[in-house]
Amino acid sequence: MKEKAATKEANKSNTTVHEIEHTDSELYKVGMYTTAAFAAAVGIWGLVCLSSAVFENGSPVEMLKTLYHAITGA
């Protein structure tokens, strides 16, 4: 009877180590997907801002002229 109890305890400790490694892997995946979602949101926000500037100035050429004047102060 004592040998069976020792075997069960040994199996539990091996399972726990495996579960901890698996949890770390899953946490890395969650972090990766969260970072990718924020990067996509920033990219979409940038495109919206750029298209807003193009609509405000009338054309991409006018937007670049306005940008040049804003940078140089002319």
Image (spheres, rainbow, N blue to C red):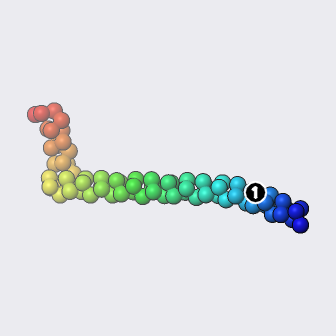
State the image coordinates of residue 24 (x, y, percent, origin top left): 60, 54
Residue 22 lies, in percent from the top left, at: 64, 58
> Circle 1 — which element?
helix
Q: Which residue lies at the image location 19% right of the left edge and 53% below the top edge? A: 53
Tell which of 3 and 67 is nearer to you.
3
Q: Is residue 6 left or right of residue 63?
A: right
Crowd around label 1: few <14 · some 14–19 · many ≥20 (10 Å): few
Residue 67 in the image: state x and y as whole percent.
18, 42
Q: Quadrant of residue 16?
A: bottom right
Q: Quadrant of the C terminus?
A: top left
Q: Nearer the viewer, residue 19 or 12?
A: 12
Between 55 and 9, the one lying in front of the other is 9
Name the residue nearer the viewer: 14 or 8.
8
* Quarter-of-image position of residue 64: top left
Which residue is at a point 66% across and 54% down the rendered structure image?
Answer: 21
Disc 1 marks which amino acid?
Asn
Q: Residue furthest left?
A: 74
Residue shown at the point (74%, 57%) measured from the top left: 13
Horizontal side of 37 relative to 14 (left or right) equals left
* Identity of the residue drawn at 65% across and 55% down: 20
For mark 1, what is the residue? 14
Classify the position of the N terminus by image quarter: bottom right
Which quarter of the picture shows residue 56?
A: bottom left
Judge left or right: residue 41 versus residue 17: left
Pinpoint residue 38: horizontal percent, then vertical percent. 39, 55
How many circles with numbers are drawn on the protein? Answer: 1
Relative side of 54 to 44, left or right: left
